[in-house]
């Protein structure tokens, strides 16, 4: 054999050694990975970053907070609302990205290839079965390559197009979830606001009454020590005072956190103080009423509840998923073209273009057509049944919320009457001028009864406001108009007031559910 023939063993050992070393290094690095808990500095950095957002300066509170002002601040600063806004934004960005999936692939590449020796080879004479004895090569030891390739799979384009439609519906689902959160937040703000008002009004009257009871206890203790009255009578008086004071402290404990809860819903930093717009003492005059027909509310709910609209969009997604699953069973068509460069000096043409088309089809996938169709059909039926069950639940919620609103309206009217009676009884005790322990105790108990009656009236009023908001939520009513001119707090507060004043007119414009049902039955 010619001595210039390159042995196939030359240069292979260093390469094998290098591969072995690289493999050993990768295995060693993989085995060295261990759980690494967060350090205290990393945790503090995370806390500072979060608090910088949570405690970001807000528009200052320059006046007493009304209910509409509280709702406006909740819409602008509540963190749950921000989360849903970001989820909608993420879904929108996902839709934007899915548009790029429909584009063809245009891949640019460049590379360098080198060898430690020549890529030589021998030839075999097929006629004689003997080697030519000459070693030749057709490749440079060092060469550069570049490619620009265009590839388009028509089947992948169809699948990506359907997927983009699904992402578009996901954007709408995210928006419906945001609507549901907004409705829930404003319902909670309405309830918390009126409970905070009740607490503020009670606490204003509670402090002097507690002081009066404490003074009466001191007097009773002194009389017991001086034995002015029979010990049993004095102790019974003290027991009545302690029971009354304990009752007042229980009321304080139940309501002392109401204002803080309202501040949290408005997105205020913990501990920030603010003033509420407290109505004048006495029964609130702004009594919510609902004049819209309940059947119109039911129809409006079926048309506008975020949960039902979300299920309708899920139906679209499921139908698109059926199309996508069946489309994957079709043959794929690849169109390709490319520009290439290779610096290999042995090539006749170092620059060239190529193009072509290719059809590929997994014939075994045809066996799953029936099962795929049955599976997707079952998915569509599941979504439809889930939507129908939710529709029944929505109708029940509308009816129940209306019943609860009517019952609370009647209960509130009774509490107003009772609070008025207790107030007149208190005035009679105060004006009677009775003296002595028994007279003082009766006056205190009359004042406590009047205070408790007023508080119960105010709390039932807060429950009535909550029931009113629950009717809105059950009907899927948006508290905001369709367009809001600005996102500043005065504009938001005005928009909330406008939306709350007009929601019954919007809901009442819907057809009655019985008319819709009859039209559906007649096929019109």
Image: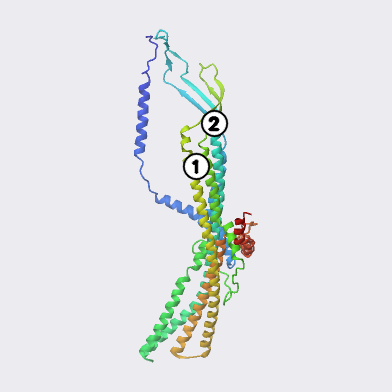
The x, y position of residue 466, in whole percent, is 53, 67
The reply to whether the C-beta atoms of the residues labelled 1 and 2 are less than 8 Å apart is: no
Give the colour scheme of this rendering: rainbow
**Circle on res. 85:** none
Relative placement, left or right, of 10 versus 524 is left
Q: Secondary structure at mark 2?
A: strand
Q: Residues within 10 Å of mark 2 (few under 14, many from 20)?
A: some
User: Compared with residue 283, is residue 190 higher up or lower down, i.e. above or below?
Assistant: above
User: Compared with residue 360, is residue 222 higher up or lower down, i.e. above or below?
Assistant: below
User: Compared with residue 480, is residue 139 higher up or lower down, i.e. above or below?
Assistant: above
**Circle on res. 333:** 2
Name the one closer to the observer, 483 or 347.
483
Q: Which image quarter: residue 337?
A: top right
Which residue: 41% across, 80% down?
243
Residue placed under numbered mark 1 in the picture:
373
What is the C-alpha distance between the residues marked 1 and 2? 23 Å
The x, y position of residue 93, in whole percent, is 55, 45
The x, y position of residue 17, in whole percent, is 35, 26
Q: Which image quarter: residue 414?
A: bottom right
Q: Locate the N terminus and report the quarter of the image it occupies.
A: top left
Q: Secondary structure at mark 1?
A: helix
Q: Locate the C terminus and report the quarter of the image it occupies.
A: bottom right
Sequence-wise first label, 1 or 2: 2
Which residue: 48% across, 71% down?
255
Q: Residues within 10 Å of mark 1 (few under 14, many from 20)?
A: some
Viewer-nearest of discs 1 and 2: 1
Name the one closer to the observer, 466 or 12.
466
User: Compared with residue 33, is residue 362 higher up or lower down, i.e. above or below?
Assistant: above
In this orientation, does residue 263 appear?
yes
In this orientation, does residue 56 appear?
no
């Amino acid at each position: 054999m010619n001595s210039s023939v390159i042995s196939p063993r030359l240069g292979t050992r260093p390469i094998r050694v290098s591969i072995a070393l690289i493999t050993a290094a990768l295995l060693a690095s993989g085995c060295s990975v261990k759980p690494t808990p967060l350090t205290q500095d990393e945790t503090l950095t995370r806390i500072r970053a979060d608090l910088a957002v949570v405690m970001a300066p807000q528009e200052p509170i320059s006046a007493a907070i009304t209910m509409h002002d509280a709702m406006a601040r909740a819409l602008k600063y509540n963190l749950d609302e921000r989360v849903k806004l970001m989820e909608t934004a993420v879904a929108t960005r996902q839709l934007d990205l899915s548009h790029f999936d429909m584009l063809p692939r245009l891949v640019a590449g460049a590379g360098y290839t080198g060898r430690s020796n020549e890529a030589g080879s021998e030839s075999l004479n097929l006629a004689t079965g003997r080697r030519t004895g000459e070693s030749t090569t057709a490749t440079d030891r060092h060469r550069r390559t570049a490619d620009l390739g265009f590839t388009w799979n028509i089947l992948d384009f169809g699948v990506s197009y359907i997927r983009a439609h699904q992402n578009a519906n996901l954007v709408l689902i995210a928006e419906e979830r945001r609507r549901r959160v907004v409705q829930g937040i404003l319902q909670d703000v309405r309830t918390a606001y009126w409970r905070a008002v009740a607490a503020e009004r009670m606490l204003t009257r509670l402090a002097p009454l507690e002081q009066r009871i404490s003074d009466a206890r001191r007097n009773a203790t002194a009389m017991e020590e001086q034995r002015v009255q029979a010990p049993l009578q004095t102790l019974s008086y003290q027991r009545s005072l302690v029971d009354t004071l304990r009752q007042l402290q229980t009321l304080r404990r139940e309501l002392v956190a109401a204002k803080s809860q309202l501040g949290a819903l408005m997105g205020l930093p913990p501990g920030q103080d603010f003033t509420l717009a407290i109505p004048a003492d006495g029964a609130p005059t702004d009594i919510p009423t609902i004049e819209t027909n309940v059947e119109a509310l039911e129809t409006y709910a079926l048309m506008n509840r975020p949960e039902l609209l979300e299920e309708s969009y899920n139906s679209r997604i499921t139908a698109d998923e059926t199309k996508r699953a069946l489309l994957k069973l079709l043959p794929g068509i690849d169109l390709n073209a490319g520009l290439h460069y290779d610096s290999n000096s042995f090539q006749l043409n170092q620059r060239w273009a190529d193009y072509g088309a290719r059809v590929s089809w997994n014939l075994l996938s045809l066996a799953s057509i029936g099962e795929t169709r049955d599976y997707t059909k079952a998915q569509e039926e599941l979504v439809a049944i889930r939507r129908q069950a939710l529709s029944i639940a929505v109708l029940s919620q509308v009816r129940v919320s209306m019943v609860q609103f009517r019952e609370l309206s009647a209960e509130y009217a009774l509490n107003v009457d009772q609070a008025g009676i207790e107030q007149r009884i208190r005035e009679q005790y105060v004006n009677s001028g009775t003296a002595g322990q028994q007279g003082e105790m009766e006056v205190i108990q009359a004042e406590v009864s009047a205070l408790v009656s007023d508080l119960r009236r105010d709390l039932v009023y807060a429950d009535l406001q909550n029931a009113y908001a629950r009717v809105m939520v059950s009907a899927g009513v948006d508290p905001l108009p369709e367009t809001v001119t600005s996102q500043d707090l005065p504009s938001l507060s005005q928009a909330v007031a406008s939306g709350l004043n007009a929601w019954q007119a919007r809901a009442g414009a819907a057809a009655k559910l019985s008319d819709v049902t009859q039209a559906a039955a007649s096929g019109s």
